[in-house]
Image: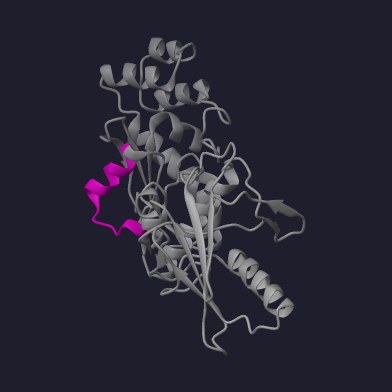
């Protein structure tokens, strides 16, 4: 079956199964995500169209495995199936074309279902965004692109939108699960507050600069935040590097002996520098937290966002911090 894509062009889909009766038509395809690490790869996606009374228009229904929106701040309002505007428009356009060609009114219910979608949704950000019971039907082009930085950053932005819409005053950006757990141990925050920043500190901070939330806790490991402290906006090892001269400066600030400072220049990793300092009773966590907070404030500029920084180890222990007023 061939469909027209939102930005022009067409794509053909093999039908896994289909059925047709007087008042209902149903079709299923097997999702092919290509090289994209999409949790829905191989899932069965079914659309069922049912006749409605004249004047009803086109209504959308969440079938098994498709979530419902429960919080404001998303493109679809609360109480609606999590089927985004572009897929909705595609379906409405197709229905209108068929209705016109057959002299019908085009008054139908469209139910979209994704087999196993409720379980798959637990591997996505949907629960944090207030989308319950399943996955979202997304898309702007109809074309699968490999997983990208832009896709992750867009998810962060939607998370901030939802947090603001539900009135949260405190959000969290963590580089990983261990640092996130450290924040959870300290604060009892709504799940929506956790923004799944990962390596994309810039994507989080630049959006907060324009869409502020009252309080921001940033938590992350020593190596990643040593890069953020120098102004790096992408903390991934492939896109930014630890500056050992910076770590030497941090050691000087902490009062480390000259031989330790010199050895840091030829260390293999930031962790090696940190471990040597900890073994000698030298605190690098607190000064790094202060430097990180100063860098974050520069990125946020004059945005009314109070910032707290926690430096954590791989077990989620806090090695150093700079509080909201520090």
Query: Magenta region's main secondary structure?
Result: helix
**Please, is residue 292 above or below residue 164 in the view?**
above
Q: Residue at x 66, y 50 (%)?
A: 143
Q: How was this image coloured?
A: one colour
**Please, is residue 240 above or below residue 171 in the view?**
above
Q: Position of residue 166 (x, y in %)?
A: 38, 70
Decide if residue 266 is in sight here.
yes
In this rendering, position of residue 139 left or right of residue 4: left
Q: Is residue 102 magenta?
A: no
Q: Position of residue 173 (x, y in %)?
A: 41, 48
**Please, is residue 82 above or below residue 234 in the view?**
below
Going by the picture, which residue comes out furthest to the right? 9
- Provide the residue span drawn in magenta: 178-192
Decide if residue 28 is in sight here.
no
In this rendering, position of residue 87 left or right of residue 78: right
Q: Position of residue 111 (x, y in %)?
A: 48, 68
Nearest to the observer: residue 111 or residue 87: 111
**Please, is residue 234 above or below residue 161 in the view?**
above
Nearest to the observer: residue 226 or residue 71: 71
Q: Residue at x 58, y 36 (%)?
A: 35
Counting labels gives 0
Q: Position of residue 76 (x, y in %)?
A: 50, 70
């Amino acid at each position: 079956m061939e469909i027209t894509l939102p930005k022009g062009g067409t794509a053909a889909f093999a039908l896994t199964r289909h059925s047709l009766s007087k008042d209902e038509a149903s079709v299923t395809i097997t999702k092919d995500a290509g090289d994209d690490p999409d949790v829905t790869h191989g899932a069965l996606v079914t659309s069922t169209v049912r006749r409605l009374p004249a004047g009803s228009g086109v209504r959308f229904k969440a079938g098994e495995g498709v979530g419902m929106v429960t919080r404001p701040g998303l493109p679809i309002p609360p109480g609606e199936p999590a089927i985004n505007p572009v897929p909705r428009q595609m379906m409405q356009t197709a229905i209108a074309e068929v209705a016109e060609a057959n002299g019908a009114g085009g008054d139908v219910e469209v139910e979209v279902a994704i087999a196993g979608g409720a379980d798959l949704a637990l591997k996505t950000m949907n629960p944090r965004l207030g989308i319950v019971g399943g996955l979202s039907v997304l898309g702007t082009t109809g074309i699968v692109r490999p997983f990208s930085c832009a896709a992750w950053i867009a998810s962060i932005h939607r998370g901030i939108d939802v947090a603001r819409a539900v009135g949260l005053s405190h959000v969290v950006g963590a580089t990983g699960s261990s640092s996130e757990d450290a924040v959870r141990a300290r604060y009892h925050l709504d799940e929506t507050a956790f923004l799944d920043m990962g390596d994309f500190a810039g994507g989080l901070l630049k959006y907060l600069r324009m869409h502020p939330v009252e309080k921001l806790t940033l938590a992350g490991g020593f190596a990643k935040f040593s890069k953020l402290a120098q102004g790096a906006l992408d903390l991934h090892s492939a896109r930014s590097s630890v500056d050992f001269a910076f770590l030497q400066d941090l050691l000087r600030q902490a009062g480390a002996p000259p031989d330790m400072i010199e050895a840091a220049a030829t260390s293999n990793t930031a962790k090696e520098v940190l471990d040597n300092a900890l073994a000698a009773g030298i605190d690098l966590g607190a000064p790094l937290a202060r430097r990180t907070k100063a860098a974050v404030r520069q990125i946020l500029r004059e945005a009314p966002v109070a910032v707290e920084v926690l430096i954590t180890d791989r077990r989620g222990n806090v090695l150093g911090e700079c509080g909201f007023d520090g």
